[in-house]
Image (tube, rainbow, N blue to C red):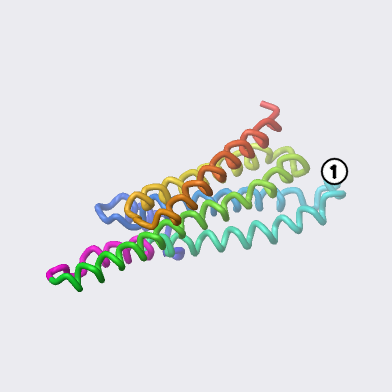
């Protein structure tokens, strides 16, 4: 899915197919966030005014590129996780044994469908400290790109969290549900605070 053109991806997204969906879009937002931070770092290199930040910017370029490619892979992973849940719901349920196997599969794959968007949210959160650096020390002509990176990172985190939460409603494992409700609550709060911190650097 990562090799689709932007037009083809959005056509699929707009169709009546449930995949790709919000989880994949969360990964796309994270990818765009990382790419913008990487762009600001690249626009800072080679400028005399920012020569003291060359090493720092080179480090950010490597880290954002890694996150960008990781998040691109999550576009497909999220769709695959959702497809497994749908396959589980289509399993036969005529006998008691079939019902038990079906319920077990739904539970297992619903957990997977919750874990994947949580990993997307966690990965997107890793972009914030990199974005903060390019906003503070990067090319000031591209500061708005860095600020938008922060906004997209927050969107990616919150979108991932929403997809975790909707899947938790179908999971009966109380410990699992409690764990991920707590983790998503904490991550949501941290992401909103970090975005606000970075946006406060804005001169506008």
Q: Is residue 83 left or right of residue 72?
A: left
Q: Is residue 81 magenta?
A: yes
The residue range painted magenta reads 80-94
> Does 197 appear above or below 77?
above
| Residue toward you, 174 or 199 | 174
Quarter of the rendering containing residue 89? bottom left
Residue labelled with disc 1: 49
Q: In front here: 78 or 41? A: 78
What is the chief secondary structure element of the magenta stretch? helix
What residue lies at 72% left-to-right and 45% top-to-bottom?
134
Residue 42 in the image: state x and y as whole percent.
71, 53
Q: Quadrant of the C terminus?
A: top right
Residue 87 in magenta stretch: yes
Q: For the point 44% across and 56% down, which residue is it? A: 176
Q: Is residue 196 above or below residue 61?
A: above
Residue under the point 67% across and 35% down? 197
Determine the secondary structure under disc 1. helix
* Residue 62, quarter of picture: bottom right
Assess disc 1: are there few (<14), some (14-19) or many (≥20) residues with their C-alpha within 10 Å of its C-alpha: few
Q: How many marks?
A: 1
Residue that lies at the very extreme toward the left in this rendered image? 94
């Amino acid at each position: 899915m990562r090799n689709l053109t932007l037009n083809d991806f959005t056509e699929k997204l707009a169709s009546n197919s449930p995949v790709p969906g919000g989880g994949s879009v969360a990964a796309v937002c994270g990818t765009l966030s990382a790419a913008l931070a990487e762009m600001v770092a690249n626009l800072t290199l080679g400028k005399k005014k920012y020569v003291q930040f060359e090493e720092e910017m080179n480090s950010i370029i490597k880290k954002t590129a890694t996150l960008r490619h990781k998040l691109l892979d999550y576009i497909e992973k999220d769709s695959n996780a959702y497809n497994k849940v749908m396959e589980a719901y289509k399993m036969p349920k005529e006998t008691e044994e079939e019902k038990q196997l079906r319920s077990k599969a739904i539970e297992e794959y619903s957990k997977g469908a919750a874990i994947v968007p949580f990993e997307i949210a966690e990965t997107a959160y890793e972009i914030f400290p990199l974005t903060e650096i390019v906003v503070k020390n990067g090319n000031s002509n591209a500061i708005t790109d860095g600020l938008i990176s922060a906004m997209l990172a927050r969107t990616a985190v919150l979108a991932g969290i929403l997809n975790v939460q909707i899947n938790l409603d179908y999971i009966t494992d109380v410990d699992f549900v409690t764990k991920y409700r707590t983790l998503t609550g904490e991550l949501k709060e941290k992401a909103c605070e970090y975005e606000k911190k970075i946006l406060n650097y804005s001169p506008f």
